[in-house]
Image (tube, rainbow, N blue to C red):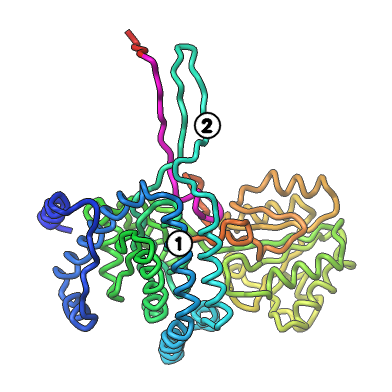
């Protein structure tokens, strides 16, 4: 973005009243027409960033009860507006069919009445989480009498770029608000109507609690140029970017962003069944991990079976998957077990199917499983099914994925299931946030030092 534009925007910021910037009422048709011009789009995005910055300054000191009221109000608005949201989603679904979106994409896009109510419940759950802002993380005294504490603070303005999932509009908006941050949301073109309907409910909640409606903004245009403007930082007003989508989106964000990124990479999720596993438990867990909902990032994509007990384990596990309509692609040893199993290619071990397909291989015990996972894992989520405690501990200690599970389904790799209310995504990096990105992960911290006249002299 030209420096001159940023200079103008910063000058405008200084002239604004800090306590309130009402969101401009704009005719949607006129807005779309304006944003067809690249210069107008750049100016509009910069203005969104400036308004978000002012809103973030208000939110940073907002009382817990005000944020709670806004979130409860948003949840109520979603429940009351369920028909409007479903009607908007029907438009997205029809356009998705016309664009021949894949089955996993359509599943992510689809909203039912129960799913909309789940979105409202997630917002309400976030409202009832402890407010992290101002929470004391640690406190200690120095020999010279200084009292030092580390307390949580909001990050500021967060940009969230996501695909398909309209629920992210509510989840991300609610989590950012609860952590005292303003957020600029840019959903995919495939879910634009659903996102607009849900966003309207979030704004209604903010207004009902007397909080700035610029705290949760939605990029109205589907022009991808808007993404580039966000990645450039909107004149320094975006503090962090969170991408939620496929590999191509995440790679673009990581490559082009000029601000920090909480990366959510694809879920190349593995589940290892050890020779010590309880077979009935293993079958139940594997079926759930793969097939409960195939389009989520926590769905298992590769099944690893201990070669030391192949006769007992392999056929029941694979037959159960096939009986449920799951396509199995196995290594040579696995493929010999059933004519219904296809031989896996090298590409299969690195594929996030997000569909009723799973790759399967025999490995030499837990060591073989760890070696396979280290080679192909995206460091998202991996699980072990074993009754041998030593095997389980080795798996949990030697692997370094963001989420590791023992004797439970990988579908629990979810912020809501962790008691976080919801999540923006599963961060697979190692800096700042890792695993489910919830309210606490959307804060930073500052040090407060209290003295009684000390000098270093």
State yes or no: residue 454 in magenta: no
Q: CA distance from mark 2 to mark 1?
A: 27 Å
Q: Is residue 343 above or below residue 312?
A: below
Per the rendered image, the range of residues in magenta is: 434-452
Q: Does the rendering let one see residue 245?
A: no
Which mark is first along the chain, 1 or 2? 2
Q: Secondary structure at mark 1?
A: helix
Can you identify the residue that label 1 sits on?
174
Residue at 40%, 67% (x, y): give it.
Answer: 205
Can you identify the residue that label 2 sits on?
138
Within 10 Å of the Cα at label 2, are there few (<14), some (14-19), or many (20+) other Cα atoms?
A: few
* Quarter placement of the N terminus: bottom left
Q: Does the rendering let one see residue 295?
A: yes
Residue at 22%, 73% (x, y): give it.
Answer: 25
Q: Nearest the camera: 306 or 395?
A: 395
Q: Are marks 2 and 1 in contact (CB under 8 Å)?
A: no
Q: Nearest the camera: 351 or 292?
A: 292
């Amino acid at each position: 973005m030209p420096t001159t534009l940023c200079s103008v925007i910063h000058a405008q910021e200084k002239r604004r009243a800090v306590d309130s910037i009402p969101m401009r009422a704009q005719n949607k048709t006129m807005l779309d027409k304006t944003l067809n011009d690249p210069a107008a789009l750049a100016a509009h995005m910069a203005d969104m960033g400036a308004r978000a910055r002012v809103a973030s300054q208000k939110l940073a000191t907002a009382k817990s009860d005000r944020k709670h009221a806004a979130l409860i109000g948003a949840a109520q608005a979603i429940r009351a507006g369920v028909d409007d949201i479903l009607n908007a989603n029907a438009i997205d679904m029809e356009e998705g069919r016309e664009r021949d979106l894949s089955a996993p994409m359509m599943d992510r896009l689809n909203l039912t009445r129960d799913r909309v109510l789940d979105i409202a419940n997630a917002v309400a759950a976030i409202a009832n989480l402890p407010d992290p802002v101002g929470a004391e993380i640690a406190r200690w005294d120095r020999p010279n009498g200084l009292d030092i504490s580390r307390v949580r603070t909001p990050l500021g303005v967060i940009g969230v770029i996501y695909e398909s999932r309209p629920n992210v509009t509510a989840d991300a908006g609610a989590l950012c608000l609860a952590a005292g941050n303003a957020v600029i949301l840019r959903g995919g073109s495939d879910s634009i109507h659903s996102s607009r309907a849900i966003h309207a409910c979030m704004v209604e909640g903010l207004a009902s609690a007397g909080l700035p409606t610029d705290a949760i903004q939605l990029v109205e245009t589907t022009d991808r140029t808007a993404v580039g403007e966000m990645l450039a930082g909107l004149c320094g007003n975006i503090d962090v970017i969170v991408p939620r989508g496929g590999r191509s989106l995440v790679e673009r964000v990581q490559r082009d962003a000029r601000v920090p990124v909480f990366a959510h990479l694809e879920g190349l999720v593995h589940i290892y069944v050890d020779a010590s596993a309880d077979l009935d438990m293993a079958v139940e867990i594997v079926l759930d991990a793969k097939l409960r909902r195939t389009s989520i990032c926590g769905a298992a994509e590769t099944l690893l079976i201990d070669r030391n007990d192949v006769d007992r384990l392999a056929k029941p596990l694979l037959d159960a998957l096939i009986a449920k309509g799951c396509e199995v692609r196995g290594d040579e040893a696995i493929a010999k077990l059933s004519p219904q199993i296809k031989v896996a290619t090298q590409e299969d071990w690195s594929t996030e199917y997000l569909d009723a397909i799973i790759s399967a291989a025999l490995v030499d015990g837990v060591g073989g499983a760890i070696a396979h996972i280290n080679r192909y894992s995206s460091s998202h989520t991996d699980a072990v099914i074993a009754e041998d405690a030593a095997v389980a501990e080795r798996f949990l200690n030697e692997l370094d994925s963001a989420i590791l599970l023992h004797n439970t389904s990988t579908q629990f790799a979810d912020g809501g299931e962790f008691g976080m209310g919801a999540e923006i995504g599963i961060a697979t990096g190692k800096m700042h946030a890792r695993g489910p990105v919830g309210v606490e992960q959307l804060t930073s911290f500052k040090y407060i030092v209290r003295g009684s006249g000390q000098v270093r002299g």
